[in-house]
Amino acid sequence: MSGQNQAHISGIVRKGTEMQMENFAGILAEEFKLRKEHVENTLRLIEEGNTIPFIARYRKELTGAMDDQTLRELTERYAYLQSLEERRREIIKSIEDQGKMTEELMRSIENAKILAELEDLYRPYKQKRRTRATVARERGLEPLADIIFAQEDVSADPMALAAGYIDAEKGVETAEDAIKGAMDIIAERISDDASIRKALREYILKYGRLESRAAKDEDSVYSTYYEFSELVEKLQSHQILAINRGEREEYLKVAIISDEGINHGLIYRRTVKGTGPFSQIVREAADDAYSRLIYPSIEREIRNTLTERADEQAIKMFSMNLKHLLMQPPVKGKVVLGLDPAYRTGCKIAVVDATGKVLDTSVVYPTPPQNKAEEAKKELLRLITKHGVEVISIGNGTASRESEIFIADLIAESGLPLSYMVVSEAGASVYSASKLAAAEFPQYDVSLRSAVSIARRLQDPLAELVKIDPKAIGVGQYQHDLPAAKLDGSLNGVVEDCVNSVGVDLNTASVSLLSRVSGVSAAVAKNIVEYRDSQGMFKKRSQLLKVPKLGPKAYEQCAGFLRVPDSDDVLDNTAVHPESYEAAKKLLEICGYTLADVKAGRINELEARVEKIGAAKAAEHCGIGLPTLRDIVKELLKPGRDPRDELPPPILRKDVMDISDLKPGMRLKGTVRNVIDFGAFVDIGVHQDGLVHVSQLADRFIRHPSEVVKVGDLVEVTVLSVDTAKKRISLSMKSDVQKGQ
């Protein structure tokens, strides 16, 4: 884990007692359907300061081979349980200090599973602001409220009883005033009743409806929700977030609607006894409690719960899309020309070699208002010929369409073996204006830095995108509405997991990339680069221990994720951790191989020889567990392997289509650019991405698009409809589209 994200995890996880940890482990094991001992081991590893990538990769025997996502979810849930327990102790102490704790109340507090239940139980004992009930108590009306609420004397005259509480000095001038004050006290008691709140909350969550209506008589992006009604429990996350934003921007009026008769009945059954005169007063107090205190409070709670749920889903989708984007296969070994499109200021050009080094830059003006297409073609052909450019990477921003047409024409006219790809330039402007970009390219202006970034995104999306705030990468929805800390924590975790799963070349990695490596802080990353610059290239992993501020613990966490391709020890170019080097050598020895054989690629029969010996026996001989053995075998077979190379390469194009060229029924290949709750957006080469609605993603019923597609997938689609005016394209991935419609 990077230093930044380690601080995030450390901030949410508190040091717990052994007893507490054991209790939480039991709860988490049940929730996550995991073995308790694996959960206990994981919690200890986290509290010891180990990073998520390190635990996921190198402590599989202890965790039962939990993946990084499960580990992060477990960590978050552990932190919630810790916070819940802390709040539970605070509440117990507060009530005990008031001398009001009972055995029954203690049991209820100890059994509360969520924060809302705890707060409901604490509500009657909380310091309250001055309320109508507070005023009534000050006027000496609590004894009257007690008598009325008991509802025991069915023959008593409430007004005659209330007359005894008239006190003009205290503001109780009539019996009616006394009754009214007593009702305020009773209403607050009813409102503070945890069982009533729980029953109402559960009923409204199950049977209530969220309704939204237009607040303005004008068209907007929120028109879908101008007459909207849906059961609370069936609301989709994207609907909740859209409605919330529409309400904030004052386009919508929103309310949660529930059956009033049933709601009142739930309260009456718990508060009203019989039909006597006192019972009628309690009934009226219950109605007041419901409309004034309980329902508005529960409505806010439910709206907050819905928002939290929607936020979690949006962050989950954002994180999943980001992961797949970062893990896109790189276009390796090719000289790339990056083109940052524009109109008035011209298209910025940067040529980079196969390693990402900038070879040349230029500016051309093929687009309006200059329209210097022929001059631009000459300049590009000069650069292409001079540097042996093979691929052109075009940013998808302003003037992208015109630039794409221009490049397609150039390829057709030149007859050169060229292809192009339109890449997302989301965040490129953020990066180009950053201190990092200025330090990396002080000789170039902001726009040329963007062209470099666009070129490098094609060559190695991961290495380039780590330089940008994950929120700016553009694969989520409503990111500006989401809780910033939670979103940042989740997205940074994704970046970290991707960087560590791929591995990092210690001798070429930037500070940005190194700072995402497990156990490496931004300061240590800078020290690594400075050490490399002053001492020369790293010859072996163990040299890391000479880097200032990189101690034994940090080395343990990071070493396995850093590669030294030119090391004399081939293990330094694998994900085999230095702690397992001896085990790897023993394995090779019992299988009849050496490290020289690994380097020369002469160990093709390694797996077969391990199986012949017996995996369990081999693992025992080497002093490691089976998961570690399997990982070592995999690494020895492919030193320096990049997991991204196993994925299909991106689609490179030579020509261009316009939205007007599309006709219903056309079959096209495309790339999934974004996955959302209601479908997926697919790039089919016409500048506007088409939408495959969730109902059109598969021949079978699916609950969520992520079941069948992910960002970067190459898919075959059929055009269903085209709206050129609104620039909307509807697509299908069904095998029999006609039946699917």
Image (cartoon, rainbow, N blue to C red):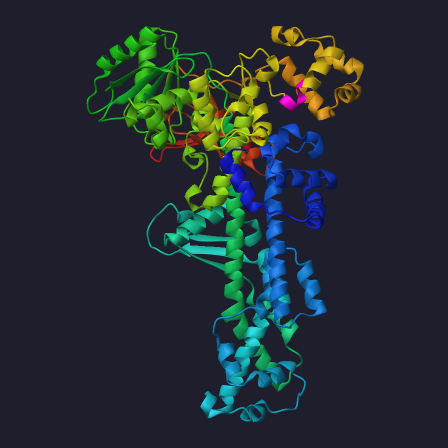
Which residue: 54% across, 36% down?
Answer: 695
Residue 341: image location, x then y, percent: 30, 24
Of residues 29 and 396, the one nearer the viewer is: 29
Residue 224: image location, x then y, percent: 43, 47
Left or right placement of residue 274 versus residue 453 in this view: right
Could one spot residue 431 in this view of the protein? yes
Magenta residues, dominant SS class: helix
Residue 519: image location, x then y, percent: 54, 31
Which quadrant of the figure has residue 65?
Answer: top right
Which quadrant of the figure has residue 497?
Answer: top right
Which residue: 64% across, 64% down?
Answer: 92
Which contiguous range is marked in magenta? 577-581
Residue 605: image location, x then y, percent: 71, 9
Left or right placement of residue 261 versus residue 482 in this view: right
| Residue 628 vertical position relative to residue 314 in the rendered view, above or below | above
Could one spot residue 203 in this view of the protein? no
| Residue 201 vertical position relative to residue 128 in the rendered view, above or below | above
| Residue 298 vertical position relative to residue 595 in the rendered view, above or below | below
Of residues 1 and 307, the one nearer the viewer is: 1
Residue 569 among magenta residues = no
